[in-house]
Structure formats: C-alpha cells, structure tokens
Image: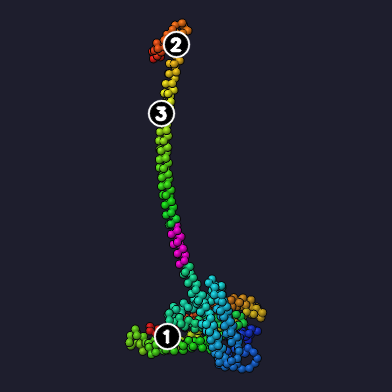
Amino acid sequence: MAGEAEHSEGGLAFHPLQQFEIHRLFGEGPIEWYTPTNISLWMAFAVLAIVAVFVFGSSSKSLIPTRMQSIGELAYDFVHNMVEDVAGHDGAKYFPMIMTLFLFILFANMLGLIPGSFTPTTHIAVTAILGFGVFVFVTLLGFYKHGFHFLGLFWMSDAPLILRPIIAVIEVISYFVRPVSHSIRLAGNIMAGHAVMKVFAAFAPMILISTIGIVVTPVSILAITAIYALEVLVAFIQAYVFTILTCVYLKDALHPGH
Amino acid sequence: MATTTTEHAAEGASAGMPQLDFSTFPNQIFWLLVTLVIIYIVMSRVALPRIGGVLANRKGTITSDLRAAEELKQKALEAERAYNDALVKARADAAKIVADAKIDIQKDLDKAIAKADAEIAAKTVEAGKALDEIRAGAAEAIATVAKDTAKELVAALGGSADARSITSAVTARLKG
C-alpha cells in the first residue's frame, strides 16, 4: 500500500481499517456474546430509523400520503413487485422476510455513510449470517416443498444426456458457492468503499505537512466527494442486489424445474 | 473495487483485520439475530399490513371514484339529452299554440265581422223604414196644408168652392 510508505515520511496517519474495529460501548473488558458494542448500537439505530419511517411515518394511514408515508409505500411497492416478478405469486408469502433483509441492509449501508458512524454490513460475520441464512432457508424450503424432486434443479433434462452429469456437478458447485458470493459481495463492496474513502481522507491534510499538498489536498477532497456519491449508489445497489438474488434463490426453491 | 478488497483483506489479515477477529463473532451474530427478529416482527405485524392496507384502500378509492365519475358523466349526458328533447318539444308546442291561437282569433274575428254586418243590415232596414214613414208623413202634411191654403185662398179671393172640388184639384196638382 502507498499508505505505508507515506506513513514513514510525513506525519500522515493511515488506518483505513480502524473504522471497522468493534469495541465495547461501556467500560472495559472482553467482548462477550451479549456485550453491547458499537455494532449493536448501529444495528439499533437502523431499527429505530426503520421504525420511524415505516411505523410512525405511516401512522396516519392517510389516503393522500405524507412524505414519510410515501417513502414507506415506495419501498413496499419496490420490494413487493420484486418478489412477485422474480419469485412468482406464491413467493408473496415470504415478502415480510425479504423486506426485512432489504431494509436492514439498506438502512445499515445508508447510516454507515454518516461520517464517524459504524457499518454493520462491512463485517463478514454479519453478511455471512445473512447469506447462509438465506441459503439454508431456501434449501430446506425446496426439500420441504418438493422433496427429492428439488434435486431436479441440478439435472438439466433438456441438455444432451452425456453432458447432464457434468452439468449437474457444475450446478451443485455453483449452488454451494452462492451463499459465499452472496455474503462476500455485500461486505466486500461496502468495506472497500469505506476503506478507500478513509485513505483519501488521510491524504487530505497533506497541505499542512508539505508543499506538494497544494495539489494533493484538493485532489483528495474531490476524490472523497466523488467516492461518497458513488458509495450512496453502492449502498442502495448492494441492498437491491442482495434482495433480488434472495428472490432468485427463492424462485429456485419454489419452482425447481428449469 | 474487487482488487482493493483483496489487497485490504490480505493486508488486514496479517495486521489484525477487524473482520477476521473471530472473538467478536458471537457478539455480532447475537446482535444481528436480535435486530433481524425485531425488524421482522415490526414489519410483519405492524408496518407491512398497515402500508398494504393503505395501498389497497387507495386503489379501491380510486377505482370507485372513477366509476362514480363515469356514472355522473353518463347522468350529465342523459340530462343534456333530456334537456334538448324538452327544448325541441317545447318549441313544437309553442308553434302549435301559436297556430291554434291564430285560428281561434281568425274564427272570433270572422264571427264578430258577420255579427256586425248583420247588425248593420238590420239597422239600415230600420232606418229606411223610419225614413219612409217620415216621408209619408211629410207628403200627407203637405197635402193637408195645400188644401187648407187653397181653401183660404179661394175664400179670400171671394170665390166659394165646395171642399170636394178643391181637394181633387189640389190632389191633381200635387201629383202633377
């Protein structure tokens, strides 16, 4: 990394990963499974924001929506249409679950863009639970709904007979890679964006240290602005991608025939 | 972006990348599950039924409003048609009334004229009769006056004549 080299020359501090550290909210000591930490604090903020928009925002149940209510209605329509279009009409039963995933990821990502905040979705442990949770749920649902026929998902009946076992092996591998890519994609995208912003932020005070800062400081500030705009987009797109992939996996479980 | 991630991951793992600190995993997983359960309960029990209800309610309201508007439009069209019909009928009625009135007036007028003519004829006859009477009266008076005058004249001239001869002479003269 360039950061390591700069660190030795000037007084710039490069700790792009420091923002991801988990620490206790109160007192000292080890982090037990029940300890309130900064990750639980920002998850709680996400819950509060979701409740504020979706419960208090729509409390008037007005025919002509208020601003908050129309945000809730937009999100409802957005996810509902996604579930119906991708997973089919019988997928609508799982709409609350998918809405929960979408809103948690979206709000965690968006709140994470507040300077100085903490982003739960940058952590592999969090996204892996989400991704593997979806994987286990969808697999069990497929076997529950279709029993042994669920394995037909891997058996391409319209491919030439000789290719079918090979395709089946590839399909099985890709099926088990799904949760890994599903969770790494989310954590990787969000973490990379935050780390890049932190690196640019570390370059910003260069003007206080050396004359080259006249060039470096404005460039890095502009870069932070640009990356921030991109990150707002990524925060939404990653929530969308995670949700739509969940819908696709759900469709495979509900309708395993190709 | 993917390459940045792997670089960070590679660097972070050796320098104690927070994401790979397994001692914090139980904590993260516990709080994640708590968060997801809370969001799920809030969504499935409160928020989603409410928003879904509002959306369905709005859809129903819009549909029924559109239907009501269509009905009202039909009613307005019907009312307009009825108005136009009534207008046409009223015009026809008015024309008929005018024609009837004209005929009635003409009839009354004819009757009045005929009556007036008859009265005028009767009055003319009466007047003629009265005129004849007056004329006859006058002729008689003239004859009487002429006889008396002739008698007086004869007497004054010293003649004597009997009444019968004078009368016949005057009568002959008067005819004359």
Residue A241's x, y, as percent?
49, 81
Distance (Cα) linking label 3 and label 1: 127 Å
Disc 2: CA contacts within 10 A as few (<14), some (14-19) or many (>=20): some
Residue B123 in view: yes
Type of amino acid under label 3: Val
Residue beneath the point at 56% across and 88% down: B31
Residue B112 part of the magenta-drawn span: no
Taking the spot 42% from the left edge, 38% from the top edge, the residue there is: B109
Instruction: Answer with mark 2 or mark 3, whichever residue precedes in sequence.
Output: 3
Q: The disc labelled 2 sits on which kind of residue?
A: Ala
Residue B90, how many percent across, how many down?
43, 51
Disc marking residue A10? none
Distance between the alpha carbons at the discs numbered 2 and 3: 37 Å
What residue is shown with label 3? B125
Say which of marks 2 and 1 sits in front: 2
Please state the extent of the stretch shown in magenta in the rendering: B67-80
The quadrant where residue A91 appears: bottom left
Q: Which residue is mark 1?
A: A253
Residue B71 placed where, x, y %?
Answer: 45, 64
Nearer-the-camera pick, A54 or B110: B110
Look at discs 3 and 1 and give the one toward the viewer: 3
Residue placed farthest to the right in the image?
Answer: A208
Q: Which residue position is annotated with label 2?
A: B150
Q: Report the predominant secondary structure element of the magenta stretch.
A: helix
> From the image, which quarter does the C terminus of chain B lie in?
top left
Q: Quadrant of residue B163?
A: top left
**A22 or A188: which is nearer to us?**
A22
